Image (tube, coloured by chain):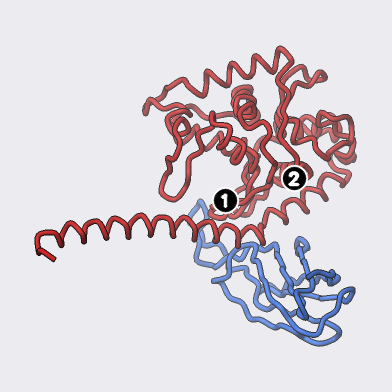
Chain colours: A blue, B red
Amino acid sequence: MADPMRIRASMLGDKVEVRVLMAHEMETGQRKDASGALVPAHFIQSVTVTHAGKTVLSAQWGTSISKNPFMHFRFKGGKPGEKVTITWVDNKGERRTDEAVIAGGS
Amino acid sequence: MPFHRLPALLLAASFCCVCQAQQDTQKEVERYRQLLAEGNPADLFEAKGEELWKTPRGPSKTSLERCDLGLGAGVVKGAFARLPRYFADTDRVQDLESRIVTCMVTLQGFKAEDVTRNPFSAPGRPSDLEALASYVAGESKGMKLAAPLDHPKELEAFRIGEQLFYRRAGPHDFACVSCHGENGKRIRLQELPKLTDPNDARRIFTTWPAYRVSQGTVRTMQHRLYDCYWQMRHPQMDYTSEASIALQVFMAKFAKGGEIHAPGLKR
């Protein structure tokens, strides 16, 4: 089981500002280990963010995204107390879903 | 304008460009660090460390929640701000990591050799100690560092640390002071703190453990010392050795009063 994400969601004006940290190796498949063997690729392929049953962000990622990726975005239509759900799926089919409650804010 | 004065003017102008560019670079680097800090992956290590701390593990199937980090059994909040310090039960001065190892041995029943065999993570081999250290250090965020320096053993450690800091040795004839003894020095973009200057020490000593972007993991003060010793081509600094702790006691004196920002974020 993958390690949990750290999600922070808060209001910024009339928008919801979301910051997500994901724990993932994000191996490119290009790197070699100490014995010279290729380290197999292992990276997040898709990220989906939903709010109130609607997809607010959907992304396709590749190997150029860093290890332990950080994503920061804003969307309209959320209110404090509502939930944001984030799911990632990697190229090995592993997945992780976490959710956060939107906090009040400026 | 007479022609002969033009080159001088141009020269002056280009100098000004250089210093302006340097300031801009410094500012941009600061901005970059701030952007990164918002998503400091050390958060992930803190979360993992907290889980490890509270999960019953080891031969004794106990958690670390009764671990005495110096403020009494079970107190994690603020403990890091009082380390390194003397511990009566082990009769030695201990830093964050050596104390965590002590607790893993005495409470959880792990063997010390097993715990400290691979204290630093490598790709594909995570380190529990890096996560645990991140968690404990993070519980002192915002507090002022105030490691005690009263007990005879703490004073002895300080003197040993002082000797180690200044004593040049090895094939390069280096000591800590060779890099950390002057203000305003840097290696490429990396500023080198003058560790005997409270301004620098307070700012830097309090940011370890830290997530190293270039290494993709949290590195601890023990790793920093190990790496400095390697860079100086000195004999290897053993994990949680007396020397490694003595150097921290020495640095902590100058860093006293600095606000803790651990786990930090570094290149």
Q: Residue furthest bottom?
A: A54
Around disc 2, counting alpha carbons within 10 Å, would you say few (fewer than 14), some (14 to 19), or many (20 or more)? many
Q: Residue A94 carries which label?
A: none
Question: Which residue is drawn at the image coordinates 37% and 26% (left, top)?
Answer: B171
Where's the C terminus of chain A, which quadrant? bottom right
**Relative to B128, is B47 above or below?**
below
Q: How many labels does the image show?
A: 2
Question: Which residue is drawn at the image coordinates 45% and 26% (left, top)?
Answer: B175
Q: Is residue A20 left or right of residue B16?
A: right
Snapshot quadrant of residue B170: top left
Residue under numbered circle 1: B266
**Relative to B35, is B158 above or below?**
above
Residue under numbered circle 2: B141
- In the rendered structure, which amino acid carries the disc numbered 1? Lys
N-terminal of the pair, mark 2 or mark 1, is: 2
Question: Which residue is drawn at the image coordinates 58% and 21% (left, top)?
Answer: B161
Question: Residue A88: x percent and y percent?
Answer: 72, 74
Question: Residue B181: x percent and y percent?
Answer: 46, 30
- In front of the other: B229 or B31: B31
Q: Which residue lies furthest to the top in this view?
A: B152
Give the CA distance from mark 2 to mark 1: 17 Å
- In front of the other: A14 or A79: A14
Question: Residue A44: x percent and y percent?
Answer: 65, 72
Snapshot quadrant of residue B69: top right
